[in-house]
Image (tube, grey):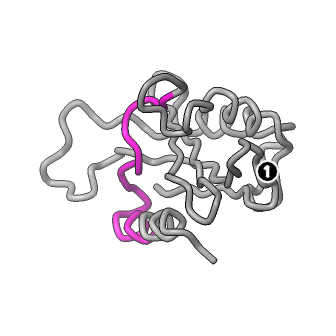
Amino acid sequence: MRTTSTFLAAALCALAAACGGKSAPASTGPGNTGGAGDPAGGDAAKLVEAIGAMAVPEPCNNDDGTANLKDHLAAQREVLGGEAATDTTFDCQPPMDGLRECTWGVYNKPPAEPDPEDPCGGECCSGYQIIFKVDAAGAIDPASVFCVAPG
């Protein structure tokens, strides 16, 4: 069964295709890594470390040959223009059926002044996401991990 956020990711992909492969990120700004308002329920840094250490699963098409998801996301960041051209995001949805769905991603930074003639925002916001589910104890379900390039 797909969750609402998985459906939303699919909808963003469809929108991206309509705009020549570009879409706005689902979550803007740098990812929250702890503290008040933490989208991961207080353990964002631990989740990023744990998901980053995992081997790249088949659904993520490891064409870059990286050993783990942290390196895989870093390789995708370089494809998008490197550290200066991208923002890193991390977000977890509220629990549904005992699981939270989390998304760790990189996106191109939006231009300072978008082209008013381009309804899709020009080069704005191409990205890459690693999506996974986490149980109440903070354990990642390895079978739930997949990747998507929404723009």
**Nearer-the-camera pick, 94 or 90:** 94
**Nearer-the-camera pick, 8 or 65:** 8
Circle 1 packing at 10 Å, graded few (<14), some (14-19), many (20+), is some
Rendered image quadrant of residue 11: bottom left
In-image side of 149 versus 109 (left or right)? right
What residue is drawn where x is 76% and y is 57%?
Answer: 61
Q: Amino acid at mark 1?
A: Asn
In-image side of 146 versus 57 (left or right)? left
**Magenta stretch, main secondary structure class:** loop
What residue is drawn where x is 56% and y is 62%?
Answer: 96
The relative height of residue 132 versus residue 73 in the rendered view (above or below) is: below
The relative height of residue 121 versus residue 58 in the rendered view (above or below) is: above
What residue is drawn where x is 63% and y is 27%?
Answer: 45
- Magenta stretch contains residue 18: yes
Residue furthest bottom as drawn:
1
What residue is drawn where x is 67% and y is 33%?
Answer: 48
User: SS class of the residue under badge 1?
Assistant: loop
The x, y position of residue 127, in whole percent, is 50, 47
In-image side of 27 versus 96 (left or right)? left
**Nearer-the-camera pick, 124 or 60:** 60
The relative height of residue 6 versus residue 81 in the rendered view (above or below) is: below
Rendered image quadrant of residue 12: bottom left
The x, y position of residue 42, in whole percent, is 57, 31
The x, y position of residue 67, in whole percent, is 86, 37
In-image side of 148 versus 31 (left or right)? right
Which quarter of the rendered picture does the N terminus lie within? bottom right
Residue furthest left as drawn:
116
The x, y position of residue 34, in whole percent, is 53, 25
Magenta segment boundaries in residue numbering: 14-32
Q: How many marks?
A: 1
Q: Which residue is mark 1?
A: 62
